[in-house]
Amino acid sequence: MGRSKPNGEQEDRWVLVADRDPNAALHLAGYFSRRGFRTYHTTQGEEAMLLANSRRLLLAIIDVSLLDMSGHALAQRLKEIDPELPVLMTSGDYAPELEAAARRVGILYYAHKPADYELIGGVVDKALKN
């Protein structure tokens, strides 16, 4: 079963954007909202988990660092709820060990900041067609 853009029976599916920087979260969520996705943005992992436990997520875009936990910890917790959830991770830190840790959690894509929204959008489109 593939994931698809939220339309018809997929209306209850959400794109979660979690980023320590509230402006970055807002702008990336806005990009996906303009593309027709239902979005939710936050700076906190626990708030993201509340959404994940109350709504069905279509995908998650998570910064390496959140205000209350690491992005790796949030990705791990989201994958425990839905092992098939596409998770993209963003980071302004170019440390290879951060990307390696993210890949061990099972992320789909690792993007360096500043984020290229069109590139991330293309990755998301491809992931949702599968």
Image (cartoon, rainbow, N blue to C red):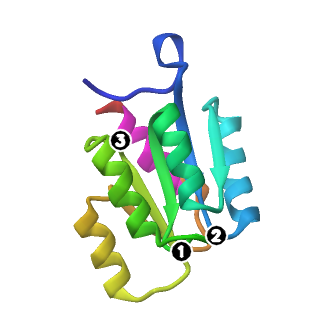
Q: Which residue is mark 2?
A: 20
**Mark 1 Cα-neighbour bin, 10 Å: few <14, some 14–19, many ≥20:** many
Q: Residue pushed farthest bottom?
A: 95
Closer to the camera, 120 or 71? Answer: 71
> How far, Cα to Cα, is label 3 from label 1?
24 Å
Q: Is residue 13 magenta?
A: no
Q: Residue at x 31, y 50 (%)?
A: 79
User: Tags 3 and 1 in contact by the CB under 8 Å rule?
Assistant: no
Residue 48 picture location, percent across and down: 55, 51
Between disc 3 and disc 1, the foreground one is 1
Between disc 3 and disc 2, the foreground one is 2
Residue 129 picture location, percent across and down: 35, 31
Closer to the camera, 26 or 36? Answer: 26
User: Tags 2 and 1 in contact by the CB under 8 Å rule?
Assistant: yes
Residue 114 picture location, percent across and down: 62, 73
Q: Which label's residue is closer to the chain start, 3 or 1?
A: 1
> How far, Cα to Cα, is label 3 from label 2?
25 Å
| Callout 2 secondary element | loop
Query: Label for residue 98?
Result: none
Q: Residue at x 70, y 64 (%)?
A: 24
Question: Is residue 29 shown left or right of residue 51?
Answer: right
- The amino acid beneath tag 2 is Arg
Q: On the rendered image, what quadrant is the N terminus found in?
A: top left
Q: Residue at x 60, y 52 (%)?
A: 47
Q: Residue at x 46, y 67 (%)?
A: 71
> How far, Cα to Cα, is label 2 from label 1?
6 Å
Magenta part of the protein: which range? 119-128
Residue 72 picture location, percent across and down: 39, 68
Query: Label for residue 127?
Result: 3
